[in-house]
Image (cartoon, rainbow, N blue to C red):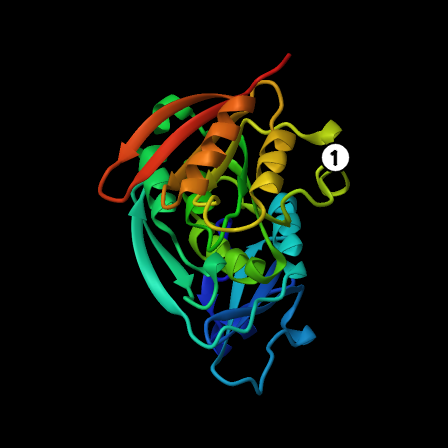
Amino acid sequence: MVRTSHWDLRPWHPASFHACSSATVTHAITLVGGTLLSLFLCNSPSQGCVRTGATRQETYFIFCPTDSHEIQQALQSLQKFVPANYASYTQEYYRFAGKKIVIQESIESYGAVVWPAAMALCQYLEEHAEELNFQDAKILEIGAGPGLVSIVASILGAQVTATDLPDVLGNLQFNLLRNTLHRAAHLPEVKELAWGEGLEDNFPKASLSYDYVLASDVVYHHYFLDKLLTTMVYLCQPGTVLLWANKFRFSTDYEFLEKFKQVFDTTLLAEFPESSVKVFKGVLKWD
């Protein structure tokens, strides 16, 4: 039962734990109150992967073959982020790309809530999957929040890098892992991205090769709109398509759109009148 060629996320149970052999790499995820506390691996039960003593603690193990090098690297990359200590979470349920998706959200942070434009963008991706052809496409999401858009893109076959601010990444990585294991050809990567800061250091221009950049509800009443546009421009190379969905709430949202049109060839792809969301396609203008 334990030795398998597929990914298997299951709650810790003494029987399955002791059945684990040294031929299986065991990745453990420790949750406290539904929040990701740690993600680490061990090669055998004798290493004592179970943590005890925390309130409402749950430990999960991911069983995979030892030669799953790509997945091991992806899982290890998730260990870097510590979740914010929100007092309460809710479990919200969505269905896109033929899959039920469970997202852990908290109203204590803008970055831990699925906003209307994220759902609209997921609907657009789902309805235009054949045209977009995400299979093995390299995608970066700006302001991924709790991860719904990145999850849907992953399920549709993309190699996704989900980015946001440090305090969001713990919850983001938990949602990504929970919803893409055993469902996606590529486990998404999680990276810190503060708009306009450290771009060359963290995303060297020479290594950028994204087919798509995705963004949803990143424009609202905040003071970083110029840095956001700078980041969008920086991440796009010749051939990169930027898909941006946004609920238009304030006059500053429309001002940003005008600045966006100055640097991107812009096409309105879809409108969702019930939620005031518009979906745009942007291709960077090149002199």
* Residue 175 horizontal/vertical position (percent): 46, 57
Which of the two residues, 45 or 171, is positioned nearer the viewer here?
A: 171
Residue 226 visible? The answer is yes
Residue 279 left/right relative to 199: left
Residue 137 visible? The answer is no
Which of the two residues, 243 or 29, is positioned nearer the viewer here?
A: 243
Q: Which residue occupies the extreme right position in the image?
A: 201
Whether residue 266 is situated above or below residue 252 in the rendered picture? above
* Residue 104 horizontal/vertical position (percent): 41, 63
Residue appearing at x 57%, y 87% in the figure:
53
Q: What residue type is labelled 1?
A: Pro
Q: In which quarter of the image is the C terminus?
A: top right
Pointer 1 residue? 204
Q: Which residue occupies the extreme front position in the image?
A: 251
Which of the two residues, 264 or 133, is positioned nearer the viewer here?
A: 264
Residue appearing at x 66%, y 53% in the figure:
77
